[in-house]
Image (cartoon, rainbow, N blue to C red):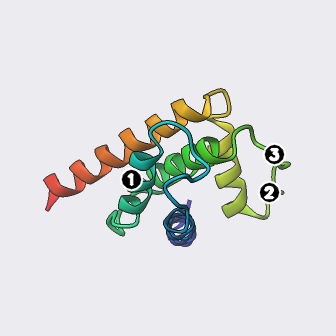
Amino acid sequence: MSVLLLSHVFADLEGIAALIDGIGKDGVFGVGSEEFEEHCAKAKTLPQNTTNENLLILYGLFKQATVGKINTSRPGMFNMKDRAKWDAWKAVEGKSQDEAMGDYITKVKQLLEEAAASS
C-alpha cells in the first residue's frame, strides 16, 4: 500500500467524523452511540503516521457499525484504494453492528495510547 492510499483513507476518516458530527444525540446508532460518536471524532486526531493497516481496520469497523453487512460489489483491481477499503469492511462482516462499534472504540483508544506513548 502506498502513502497515497494512507492519505485517502485518512481523508475518508475525516469525512466519516464530519458525518458523525452532524448526527444528533438520537442518531442512527444503538446503545453506546454517544461513546462511539466521541471516538469517531477522536479518530480525526490520530497522527499522520498512523499505518494504512490501522486506518483500514478503523474504516472496516466504522462501516460495519454504521451500515452493517457489506452492500456493494468488490471494486476492480485497478481501483486499489476502494478495493482496500472494501476488503477491510469485508474482513469484519461477521460482527454485529454493536460488536463492531465496541471494537472501533477499543481500536481508537489503543491507537491514541500508542501515539501518546511515542511522543
Q: Amino acid at mark 2?
A: Met
Q: Which residue is mark 2?
A: 77
What is the distance, in whole Å, between disc 1 and disc 3 at their CAs? 24 Å
Which-is-in-front pick, marks 1 and 3? 1
With 59 as the anchor, is 89 left or right in this view? right
Q: Amino acid at mark 1?
A: His
Q: Which residue is mark 3?
A: 71
- The residue drawn where x is 65% and y is 44% is 89
- The residue drawn where x is 67% and y is 33% is 93
With 86 as the anchor, is 24 left or right in this view? left
The mark that comes first in sequence, 1 or 2, is 1
Q: Secondary structure at mark 3?
A: loop
* Badge 1 vs badge 3, beta-carbon distance below 8 Å: no
Percent of width and height locating residue 72: 83, 49
Name the mark on residue 2. none
- The residue drawn where x is 60% and y is 35% is 97
Quadrant of the image containing the C terminus: bottom left
Q: Secondary structure at mark 1?
A: helix
Which-is-in-front pick, marks 2 and 3? 3
